[in-house]
Amino acid sequence: MTRFSRIFGSIVGILATALFAAPPVSNPTGYVIDFSKYEFIDSTLNLIQFPNGKDSFEPFYQKMDSLVFENKGQVRIMHIGGSHIQADVISGRIREHLVKEYPGSSAGRGFVFPYSAARTNTPSSYGSQYKGVWDMSKNVLREVKKPLGLLGIAVSTSDPRAEFSLLLDKYNSSPIYEETKFRLFGYSDSNNVVPVLVVDSVDIKGVLDTATQSYVFKSPRPIDTLTFAFRWADTTLQAKVAQYIIDSLVQDSIYRANLDTTEIDSTTTGKDSAANKNAAVKENAEASADSMFQGDCDILDTACLERVEVQNGLMAACALLDTAKAPVDSAQKAVCDSLIELSKTMSAVRPRFTLTGVLSESDYPGIIYTNVGINGARVAHYFEDICPLFEKELAFVKPDLVIFAIGVNDANVEKFDDKAFRANYDTLIQRIKRVNPNAAFVFETNNDMFRKVRKRRYVQHPVGEQARKAFFKLAEKYKAGIWDKFSLMGGLGSMAKWEKASLAKKDKVHFNQAGYHLLGDMFYKALIDSYQEHIANLPALEPTPKKVEDKPKK
């Protein structure tokens, strides 16, 4: 039995009853939320509302029908927002329910990214690691230096040591995302560096799709840890530059050790002084050589690489040899001479690669749930002038359902302009509709929030209801669903109650893990209840008449 054949199980009988008799259908997983200890939550409002009907949801429901009843096809969901969604706790909770419980299968993890290389928080549902030096650009910055795509973030590198790993099942008790198909979105400035997928220490080359600026990879076996490295066309140059960086780090550590041991030398003499100094040099050299693979910010950001590794490390360490009163170590002098020669190589333009995302998917039936979120993002941060590759990459997701959770940062202002807010959403929605005109939409109203007026003092933000009404107008205009998070969590001022109940953080804007999990549980229940209502209203099927066999002639 494959991991994808477990979709049905106990739900088949319930759904079959729904098809033939069409009674009301309860949640097929028996999923229940205990609201008894949260009296401030209005659980009666935990539903998907449809201010202008739900006709636009029929394509989504029909895809769900094919998956649930026939184990065919894939249902693609995209959840887009700001910091709530980058953290991927609420969206991760919804994904977990869908791929584990109902319908109970995954067709891939969707878009992922090495957020650690961008020095920002990785979504809570997977892990990321990196080596080398990376520059970052994202849609919320005042100056965006790289063309961005669907995720609104990019990292670029010219470091010959650069690689990154994505651990898709890091937090899963049993593997879910063992896949063989991957698409890496990115480009080389001069077509002189290419990404490779490293599986069992073997480089797997990708097929370049120039039209979409992406590379398609196939793993020889299912994997849930994706490791990508970057190979320069000039392999000799790559090796030389890599060795230069490593050697300069070591020389820098020796230089620092010499400075650090000055005090030791002044208080000790003879063999003890030499032994302490040699031990310190060795310890610092080993730490430096190791730290370059651990993402230490003081060594690995670009400015630090240039100033410390090259200038302070190389020049100061080698200058120390020229001014040293003690006999110069010939081996160290040789390394210095070599580094000075190689430094000329470093002044040349190095190959650079820019990454905007990785898509993990499969051919199996199931759910693909992609979260798209950047801390601080507003609706306009996903516009074409900032994210020109958005639609090109979205075409590989082609979401059947889009959950809009952008709005907290738009409304976190002194004066909220609801007309401009809705106009911005119009622009973003048109971008999505160009990719999939039949996509269904669900709008999340903003959570209640407070504004910080001075240190440790927060006041109620009065625009919650105004923003809520703007979302309802959008839902009516686009015949979309709406999940009224603002009202169900208790309305204006309710964030203080969520904080008191240990569900929200002190900033009274964000939730903690328990709060996000509760919200994810509630949204999942509201979404599945909506789908179950669709099932309950399906016309009953006529039973197939039994074929009467012809009697044999006498």
Image (cartoon, rainbow, N blue to C red):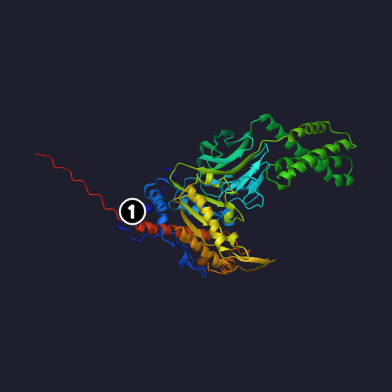
Q: Residue at x 31, y 56 (%)?
A: 539
Farthest residue toward the right? 325
Residue 75 percent coordinates (x, y): 44, 49
- Would residue 283 be seen by someone viewing this image from the given angle? no
Residue toward you, 366 or 185: 185
Q: Dividing the image into 4 quarters, which one contains the C terminus?
A: top left
- Would residue 117 be seen by someone viewing this image from the given angle? yes
SS class, disc 1 = helix
Farthest residue toward the left? 554
State which quadrant residue 187 falls in: top right
Residue toward you, 507 or 328: 507
Residue toward you, 186 or 112: 186
Residue 76 percent coordinates (x, y): 47, 49
- For disc 1, the neighbor class at 10 Å (few under 14, some 14 to 19, many from 20) is few
Residue 506 percent coordinates (x, y): 63, 64
Q: Amino acid at mark 1?
A: Ala
Query: Seen in the image, is 249 located left or right of residue 364?
Result: right
Name the residue carrying label 1: 16
Residue 377 percent coordinates (x, y): 60, 55
